[in-house]
Image (cartoon, rainbow, N blue to C red):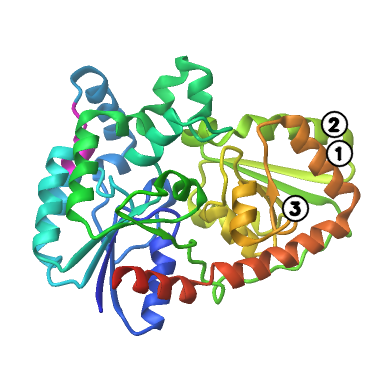
Amino acid sequence: MKILLVGEYSRLHSSLKEGLVKLGHEVTIVSSGDGMKKFKTDINFNSKIKSSFLLNKLNSLCIRFFNTDFIKIENAYRFKKLLPKFRDFDIVQLINEDALFIEPKTQIKILQQLITHNKKLFVLCCGDDFTSVNYYLNENVKYSIITPYLKDKTLKNLFVFSLKYTTKPYKKLHEFLKLNSSGTIASDMDYHLPMQGLPEYLGLIPNPINTDKVEYIKPNTNNKIIIFLGINTRSKIKKGISFFEKALEDIQEKYADKVSIKITENLPYNEYIKIYNESHILLDQVYAYDQGYNALEAMAKGKVVFTGAEQEWLDYYNLEENTVAINALPDAQAIFSTLEWLILNPEKIAEISKNARQFIEREHNYIKSAKQYLEAWTH
């Protein structure tokens, strides 16, 4: 089949492409590179405004004072110019409802052309969208990425990206895709939970990880245990990073002779990977039920990852607690206690490391995942 994957988040579509190509399909990825992560793509419509520090600052002022986002205008212009290349595909898949990062009204017009000139269009429920944001705003769940905002409405400006999906224009975009796409697929448990029972929902397909490319690194804990926290400041609040920071302060104070703590901010993907390769423990996120892509790649490398590993996830994969990943709770003391347990019992690091790799190979293999996508697309 001829397949077009639109947009990229944390190498999901790139790994899926690798699996699909292995199975004999022709695949093209068009994306903006996912911002600062700068992922490689077949066709790039990355904004020149966004890439320029000065122009980006000027654009922020235009948004603030004139409610005009020139990055979205530029994205629309660039993608429209590319539209003649995007014809006669058997499958088009959007990484998200807002895959193009264009104003909804204009995005609908562009999507209409994609739908008209190709056979089937699917949408991934991956990242914030209308369904997941409204679910976590309105349902009585123990926590979610929206929790910090629900606890403190003064943080509203930090949740503009999430809350935009509750507005009328994005509801229209959602309704358009619901009516005109062939279905929606969830990439992990955090999106599976809100989607359950909806007629357009085709099910959860675990994030694909290319385990042929991701090398397992057997942990050596004879020296200091290395703990890594890589921070993206834009999502710091949503991921509950403050709980990790507090726990690490206490760990540093009590176990300075046993640990080496590395904290970075806003690194491009390639640099980020180089630094965490050396670590034994990776602190990923708190407000989640399942692992995001970075956590999964770290698990494939044999890292002990503090991330979403809630009971719903344990039940789905038939796992026991703390066997392949650590469920990071919004509780700095709980995080400290688990870190302390690992520091004092380094053999557990080796055990969880091995289990994590086996779990990724079993449940997230990129070829297995690609086959599941093909089945969903051709249902």
Q: Secondary structure at mark 2?
A: helix
User: Cβ–Cβ below 8 Å for labels 1 and 2?
Assistant: yes
Which amino acid type is marked by label 3? Asn
Q: For the point 38% across and 33% down, which residue is it?
A: 134
Query: Is residue 169 toward the left or the right of residue 299 in the image?
Result: left
State whether the magenta stretch is mostly helix, strand or loop: helix
Report the residue marked by disc 1: 256
| Of residues 318 and 294, the one drawn nearer to the viewer in this rendering | 318
Q: Eyeballing the image, is 119 above or below 59?
A: below
Q: Could you say where residue 228 lies in the image, as x and y percent from the top left?
A: 68, 47
The boundaries of the magenta stretch are: 68-74
Which amino acid type is marked by label 1? Ala
Q: Could you say where residue 137 lies in the image, as x and y percent from the top left?
A: 43, 29
Res 27 seen here: yes
Residue 253 marker: 2
Q: Quadrant of residue 83?
A: bottom left
Point out the tag, 3 or 2, that comes first from the N-terminus: 2
Q: Give the alpha-carbon distance from disc 1 to disc 3, as whole Å.
A: 24 Å
Query: Is residue 16 toward the left or the right of residue 258 in the image?
Result: left
Q: Give the alpha-carbon distance from disc 3 to disc 2, as whole Å.
A: 25 Å
Query: Is residue 94 toward the left or the right of residue 225 in the image?
Result: left
Report the residue marked by disc 3: 322
Q: For the point 42% across and 71% down, which residue is it?
A: 372
Mark 3 burial class by Cα count in 10 Å: few <14, some 14-19, many 20+: some
Question: Does the magenta portion include 72?
Answer: yes
